Image (tube, helix red, strand yellow):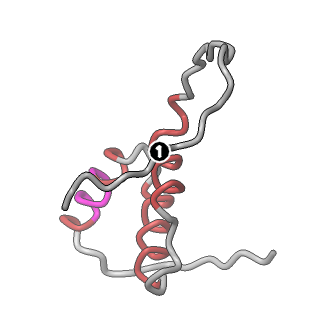
Amino acid sequence: MPVAAMSIRNIDERILELLRIRAARHGRSMEAEVRAILVDAVREPGEGPNLGQAIMTRFGELGGVELEIPPRTGAPRAAEFRDDNP
C-alpha cells in the first residue's frame, strides 16, 4: 500500500506546543497524533469503532483478568416469566 508524505508550512509555534502536549498525553509522537487527528477529521459518521472496539483500543494493553469459573453442579432450569402487575 503506497504511503503519502505531506509537509505543512507556517504552523504557529503555540499550535505546535499544544500538539506536542496532546501527543504526549496520548502516548504518541507528534506525527502519530497528527495522523490520528486527520483520520478522525475525515471519518464519516458511523465509520468509527464501536464501543467495544473503543474500549479495547483504550484499555487493551492493560490485559484481561483470568477468572476461575466453577463447574456447574445442577442442571440448567428454564426462566420463569410472570406478570405480577395487574
Residue sitting nearer the eye, 83 or 39? 83
- The span shown in magenta is 16-21
Label 1 Cα crowd, 10 Å radius (few <14 / some 14-19 / many 20+): few
Residue placed at 58% from the left, 41% from the top? 78
Residue 75, horizontal then vertical, whole percent: 68, 25
Residue 20 in the magenta stretch? The answer is yes
Residue placed at 31% from the left, 81% from the top? 10
Q: Quadrant of the N terminus?
A: bottom right
Q: Main secondary structure of the magenta part?
A: helix
Residue 78 in the magenta stretch? The answer is no
Residue placed at 58% from the left, 17% from the top? 67
Quarter holding residue 16: bottom left
Q: Which residue is mark 1?
A: 80
Residue 85, horizontal then vertical, whole percent: 21, 57
On screen, residue 2 above or below 71: below
Q: Quadrant of the C terminus?
A: bottom left
Quarter holding residue 71: top right
Q: Left or right: where does residue 48 sit relative to residue 13?
A: right
Residue placed at 24% from the left, 57% from the top? 17
Secondary structure beneath dot 1 equals loop
Residue 70, horizontal then vertical, whole percent: 63, 13
Q: Amino acid at mark 1?
A: Glu
